Image (cartoon, grey):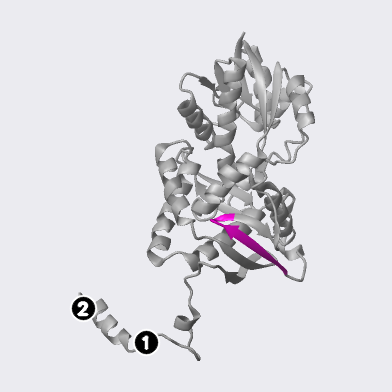
Amino acid sequence: MKKVVLAYSGGLDTSCAIPWLKDKGYAVIAMIADVGQKEDFAQIKTRALKTGAAKVHVLDLKKEFVENYVFAALKAGAVYERKYFMATSLSRPIIAKYQVEVAHQEKATAIAHGCTGKGNDQVRFEVTAKILDPKLETIAPVRIWEFKTREEEIDYLYSKGVTLEITKKKPYSIDKNIYGMSIEAGVLEDPWTEPPEDIYQMTTSPEKAPSKPIYCEIDFGKGIPKKLNGKSYHGVVLLEKLNHIGGTQGIGRVDMVENRLVGIKSREIYECPGGTILLTAHQELEAMVLDRETMRYKQGVSLKYADLIYYGLWETPLKKQLDQYIEETQRHVTGTIRLKLYKGNCTVVGRKSPYSRYKKELATYGHGDQFDQKLSEGFIKIWGMPY
């Protein structure tokens, strides 16, 4: 039998894909990627085997995901359409990378995923895999199988004796990792409908958040967060702590209608408490240490970098070229940012850096002012002369 490596989440689509691929004559090898979704991977592995997988690989990718993907996006300031922190988008290239590695290890001729033909993830998985190994066949069951609705998939699994934590009454599609959560489908498909509170898993409702604010300090070294409240943490632990702190304060909820790569608009709900705190702090630190022209130019780079991530172009030459530019901008992004977290709001209230370009003696209107205001008259005349 030909072997296929399936990126297996344990959710509805990939659970249906295992018996479906098996019926097509494939030996299915399930690959489960731990990117911090905090699930029972032993149970998911058992589910994969129960539904017909010949073998299961469980890979712990959290450290690499945070340090090489999440922090790369953080340094770039990458936010898709200025709202989406791309937790799901960022996880796809690392999963695809290891999917290809497992295919090589198992001598598989194909890889498969559970993405729909309407979504972005299909592009991210397939483009990444094709760049890394053009010879591998890609199979996308959801694009070609006989099931037309999620309800039909649920019935199919029930007929196979498999039950999931999903019902016809609550058919949300959820993707979670250490950086954030994406939620879609069900009643959320009506953009006029307010999201029900029970969909949120990482954040407390701002209305129910504590009545007193929390203050925290984040230390950065060359654009990378190193310390929280004066204590050093590795990336995974630091992000987990910020998720907890921000989540209890209702930080990081996003409700947006976004432009998918395939050309349609979709309504999405996101949670990204730790990422919201980190990006807010990082941007403020950059405001202190970067010169004006670099800041303005980098804003355009940030938008482009976000598009490359969202469009599944992580492994492309342009993205790698931009990495080098971004790394150069981060040489002096070192310092400490103090934030106030209160009922869904994340506000910077303090900042300091050994590379700060802020000079009090030039900015002050009080004693110690060293700005020669007489020079402004000539500056204004020259500045306005072309007009």
Residue 214 placement: quadrant:
bottom right
| Residue marked by disc 2 | 385
Position of residue 284 relative to residue 41, above or below, is below
Quarter placement of the C terminus: bottom left
Residue drawn where x is 59% and y is 62% of the image: 281
Question: 31 or 234, which lies in front?
Answer: 234
Q: Is residue 220 magenta?
A: yes
Question: 126 or 294, which lies in front?
Answer: 294
Badge 2 local density, few (<14 within 10 Å), some, or many (20+)? few
Position of residue 296 relative to residue 151, above or below, is below
Residue drawn where x is 59% and y is 26% of the image: 99
Residue 173 placement: quadrant:
top right
For the residue labelled by badge 1, is the local secondary structure a helix, a strand or a loop?
Answer: loop
Which range of residues does the magenta coloring cover?
A: 214-224
For the residue labelled by badge 2, is the local secondary structure a helix, a strand or a loop?
Answer: loop
| Residue marked by disc 1 | 372
Residue 262 visible at all: yes
Q: Does the magenta stretch include residue 123?
A: no
Residue 191 percent across, percent down from the top left: 58, 51
Residue drawn where x is 67% and y is 42% of the image: 176
Residue 379 percent across, percent down from the top left: 28, 81
Judged by depth in the image, the label closer to the viewer, 2 or 1, is 1
**Hey, what amino acid is under mark 1?**
Asp
Residue 152 visible at all: no
